[in-house]
Image: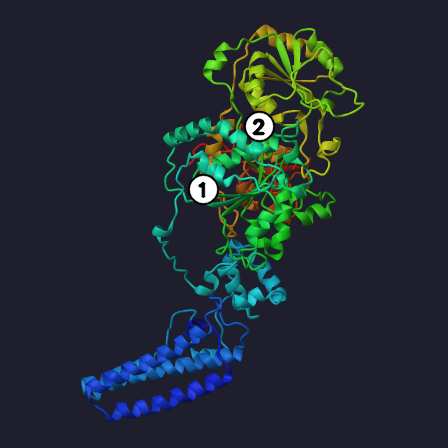
Amino acid sequence: MAITIWRLCGRAPNSRQLLVTACFLFLFWCLSLYRVTTINQSRESDLLKAEIIRLSENYVRALARENSDIVDGPYAGRFTAYDLKKTIAVLLESMLDRIDHLEAKVNITKLGGLFALSSNSSQHLNNNVNPAKGIINAEDVINGVTEECALTAEDKQLFPNCEGKVMWMRQMWKSDPCYGAYGVDGSECSFVMYLSEVEGWCPKKAWRGKVQIIPEDTKLIRYANISTDIEELMKVLVDPNERQGYAWIRMRIRRMWPRFSKAMKSLQLKQDMNGRRKKKILVHLGLLSKQSGWKFAESQFKGGPLGELVQWSDLVATLFLLGHQLTITSEAEQLAGILNKLPAANSPCQSRKELPVDIIYTDIVGLRQFKKHVKGGYGKFSCLLRIVDSFGTEPAYNLRSWAKAHKILTTWGGQDLQPQQFFTMFPHSPDNSFMGFVVEQHLNDTNVVKIERRNQALVYGKNEYMWEGKAAYLEVIKSLVEIHGTVYIDTEAKNKTHTIPSYVNNHGLLNGEDLHTLLRQSKIFIGLGFPYEGPAPLEAIANGAVFINPKFNPPHSSKNTKFFKGKPTERKLTSQHPYAEQFLGEPYVYTIDIKNIQQVKDTVARILHRNEFNPYMPYEYTEEGMLQRMNAYIEHQNFCQFQKQPAKWPPNSAVKFILGGKGVSCKDACWAKNLICDPSHFRDINSKESLLENGATCAQSKEITGILYPSFNTVTNECEIQKEEFLFSCVGEHLELQRLCPCRNYIKVQTALCQGCEV
């Protein structure tokens, strides 16, 4: 009762106000009691009762007006001492007791009998104010009793981070005034209250008792409605400065919009798109900012890297079509302008109710800018982030403390996010989420019919340096087909030696339609080994050209290839385009050793002899496939849920657990069973019992921190359990260990989703 009244008041008045008011009320009530006992008229008793209630209400409201700027919440009083809390609690309860007593007297007067007093009022006065569990009356407060906020064993299991957060609060709650503003006063209970009500790290029932779920007002819910008005999108996608950084993105979206709109209508026919909540989404393209130093904006029409811009273009179009509210920025000043509107943006207190966005898409550069501007308030935003990360970030590189201790910390890694918050261009690592892009189709059916396939090959390499050292390889192909190129030649460069062979018919940089026409005319698309994992090979295959995919032996990785130095991954690329090698294969892709001249000659001859140049488009790289995939992510992924509970998506029905062979990663163990490792279910099997149920023969277990667990150690016969959940990994492997792996089924043409996970 005392706590409840305390919250109504907001904070304690000063001592002089308190004393004067208390004396006044005490004197008034004494006179009132005398009048009640001497005046028997019913009308006067009713007037007296109403006057008492009115004055009491005025008193509470006056205090409320005086403290209207106080933040509501547990222990809402700011900078209040515990003794003063006791005083105000006793005073207010005394006032209420006296009102109860007066009401009883009035009732006696009305009834006109002394019997009512002995049978009713005495019983009322002997009862506590509120006997419910967890509510403390004034006498308890005087005796030093506090709310029961102890964490049970079940609480600690369901909220594994709660204890650590409470320990942090004990030492650091005075580090920022925002904690006091939310009612933290140094008591253990205020820590738990804050961490449950504001930040969500602790269970609310630890201090509330049984939590009553208040139904949401459905009238306030905004639903996402499909939007196909491109002009509305263009009003959002406005260049912030004269560099015209969005020019290429806007051009691609306009060109592809008819296909995107058609795909959206097709998806609506296949699955129910109603009842989806409209999300407020911030898209910050850090790579286009002046601060990045990458000059993406300046080089977008001069042969610069376009793979990232392709991905951003398709993401923006997808989010808008799905009906969500977009804010798009690319300069640090724009981002600062948005964040500066939030008074609590820099505050470390992690209340997310006040934030203007539900999801934030950015890249590593944008993430750094974000941290710089929110500073101590980064924690409240971190679970909203989705990082567009072309090559991926593995768990070992993501957890800063682990990466630093093992000397693998890079400038790109150490972000301390959930690994699935990183969104990749291809589905190369199940630890991250596969975002993908759309393979553009510039030619309509009428144009395609008119194009004749010729005995020619087009080289995949728009910059001269990519051709260096490939003369012998190209000479072999030249003996069988005519070779064409689309190389950007810098005519302003002086005294530069050109490496393009004279027999190559170079068309220079082409627009999309002309490039696709050239691909439709060609029989072969020649890979040179770089760039890695770009969109061009899929565009070639979609136009019927067969891709020659250079094989790497040994595989390229950060250990032997300069390009991957500093990237937060230990991926081993076995070819220039692993997706084409693994998911497509022959007759669309031939992965060969291009240094083996005879193999090159035999492969080209084989392709020409088969004379099969059928276009193929993987569904996951179509407009509809991307719309379906991203819609599922937005609807189901929630990285702000800190309660430990079984994974809900993908559902258990799509997942099976497999004990892999010695030295085999979960990625490979699942793939061998035609399944895909799903890291969201690692938590469900991280126990000795799960290992035993799936074939391990361990007698004892121990907790270990690393990327290899849960697993069975075949040397020590121990079950090894993961201690740090941020290190759950599909890619870790060790010769002595059999890893226990969560493997899910998948839609053949939509690998990111399990069967039935589309909606």
Q: What residue type is labelled 1?
A: His
**Is residue 722 in view from this perspective?**
no
Question: Residue under circle 1?
Answer: 324
Q: In which quarter of the image is residue 727?
A: top right
| Mark pair 2, 1: CA separation | 39 Å
Q: Nearer the viewer, residue 705 or 616?
A: 616
Q: Position of residue 408 (x, y in %)?
A: 72, 42
* Position above or below: 584 against 116: above
Looking at the image, residue 199 lies above or below residue 121: above
Front-most of 501 and 48?
501
Residue at which label 2 appears:
672
Q: Residue at x 48, y 39 (%)?
A: 235
Mark 2 vs mark 1: give the one in front: 1
Quadrant that contains the N terminus: bottom left
Q: Which kind of residue does numbered mark 2 sit on?
A: Ala
* Furthest-right residue in this view: 495
What is the image's colouring?
rainbow
Q: Considering the numbered disc 2 on the image, is that residue within a helix, a strand or a loop?
A: loop
Q: Which residue is drawn at 52% across and 13% down?
A: 614
- Whole-percent x, y for residue 571 in the image: 67, 33
Residue plotted at (53% across, 27% down): 674
Residue 289 % position (x, y): 63, 41
**Mark 1 neighbour class, 10 Å CA radius: few under 14, some 14 to 19, many 20 or more:** many
Circle 2 crowding by C-alpha within 10 Å: few under 14, some 14–19, many from 20: few
Left-right relation of 442 to 376: left
- If you read the primary sequence from the N terminus, does the residue marked by circle 2 or circle 1 appear first? 1
**Residue at disc 1, secondary structure:** loop
Q: Is residue 329 left or right of residue 210?
A: right
Q: In this view, does 173 lie above or below 292?
A: below
For the C terminus, which image quadrant? top left
Report the residue at 49% width, 58% height from top. Answer: 203
